[in-house]
Image (cartoon, rainbow, N blue to C red):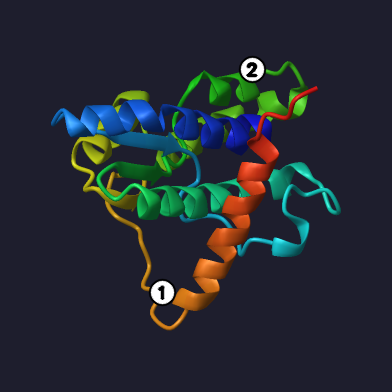
Amino acid sequence: MVGRYYSRFLLTQELLPLLKSANELGEDAKVMSILGAGHGPPVDVDDLGLKKNFSVIRVVLQTAAYMDYAFEEFAIREPAISFTHISPGAVDTPSWSNVLDYDQWVVQLIRPVLTPLIRLFTVTPADCAESMLYALFNAEKGFNRRNRKGESNLEDKSGKEEVEAEIRKKVWDHSIETTSVRPT
């Protein structure tokens, strides 16, 4: 959770003075986090930090949702700055070929089938980078949530504003408490 969420939250928090200064000087002030924007499940507000029910898959899913709420709150607090959370989707990086390079006979047997399938569902690193930069450079001030092509994937939350605000506040308070430096 530290690598996927808390470090991103704290880095954004610590960079805010520089972002505000840049904005005051007329420079672009933009932040982007590349994670699973819009793909998180409902946040389990009774288990923030996953202290009761920890698993790797819960970390992956919950941290994506935390980032959505945190960037939305950053944008509310600092409306002159752009906060973009984006989901790159599956990118054809060396990690995919590492999976296919195992010497196990089963992997070698299905490798001819898996290789084209992986390419069918992934994008190249260059295409991914282009989409990420497009999203960053074209982000408006406030909160932006983008898909793998850099397009907005904000859903309509009409009628859910009060519930969403309550969840956002709980995630924010938890994040501040968790990332606060405590004297020893």
Q: Name the residue under label 2.
A: 101
Which callout, 1 or 2, points at the residue further toward the start of the chain? 2
Instruction: Bin the neighbour count of mark 2 within 10 Å (Cα to Cα): few under 14, some 14-19, many 20 and up.
Output: few
- Label 2 secondary element: loop
165 vs 75, left or right, is right
How far apart marks 1 and 2 lie (CA) works out to: 44 Å
Q: In this view, does 14 lie above or below 135?
A: above
Q: In this view, does 171 lie above or below 182?
A: below
Q: Residue at the bottom extreme?
A: 159
26 or 144, which is in the foreground? 26
Q: In which quarter of the image is residue 167?
A: bottom right
Residue 55 percent location from the top left of the image: 79, 45
Disc ID at residue 157: 1
- Residue 43 visible in rendering: yes
66 or 183, which is in the foreground? 183
137 vs 177, left or right, is left
State if disc 2 and disc 1 touch (CB < 8 Å). no
Quadrant containing the C terminus in the rendered view? top right
Q: What's the amino acid at mark 2?
A: Asp
Q: In this view, does 47 lie above or below 20?
A: below
Residue in the image at 77% along x and 21% along y: 104
Quadrant containing the N terminus in the rendered view? top right
Residue in the image at 64% along x and 61% along y: 43
- Residue 127 visible in rendering: no
9 or 146, which is in the foreground? 9
